[in-house]
Amino acid sequence: MGDGHNFRQLKEAILAHSQAQDWEIARKEWSLVRVATADEPETCPCGHFPILEICTIANQITGHRIDVGNRCVKRFLGVRSDLIFAAIKRIQSNIEKSLNGDAIVFFHQCGVLNNWEYSFLQDTMRLRQLTLAQKVKRQSINEKVIAAVAKRGFHG
Ligand SMILES: [Zn+2]
């Protein structure tokens, strides 16, 4: 890729922690389970430095976890983690704002949002005017999401 992203090196790291040894099968064992903002810049297994928006991917069979950057998650899993981080920044700067679709789906999948909250956020995402009750609810859900995206130290 010419910009410090060595996909072959990433592949080797992923395969070393996968059960399947065929790349096309092995990649399906993985999913995005956590996003976090690093206090200290980290290095992606592809060799790219620095990464500050850390995506933890987990292998459903071996249980192994690996931290990678946004670019590799998109390339490897097709997940737009950059849009999830954009949504987090948006609600961090204004707690009344809405999360976007990518963030809503991700936080529901990883168990931060329950089914009711998942539907509520979809129903109110594009509304220009919220009732007071809806505003209060959205704000408390946003606070829960921000708390879930825990900051972490350099030792992981
Ligand atoms: Zn990478």
Image (cartoon, grey):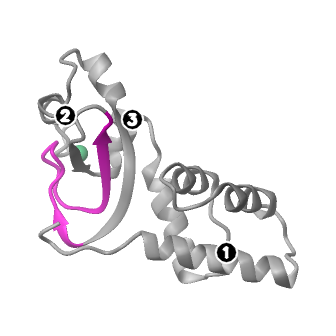
Q: Give the Cα separation between the discs numbered 3 and 2.
A: 12 Å
- The reply to whether the magenta stretch includes residue 56 is yes
Amino acid residing under circle 3: Leu
Using the image, determine if residue 78 lies above or below residue 122.
above
Using the image, determine if residue 110 lies above or below residue 31.
below
Q: Nearer the viewer, residue 102 or 61?
A: 61
Give the structural element (helix, strand or loop) at label 1: loop
Q: Where is residue 148 drawn, in percent x and y?
A: 44, 70
Left or right of 61 in this view: 103: right
Which residue matches tag 1?
97
Magenta-colored span: 39-60
Amino acid residing under circle 2: Ile
Q: Give the Cα separation between the discs numbered 1 and 3.
A: 28 Å
Q: Where is residue 47 drawn, in percent x and y?
A: 12, 46
Label 3 Cα crowd, 10 Å radius (few <14 / some 14-19 / many 20+): some
Which residue matches tag 2?
14
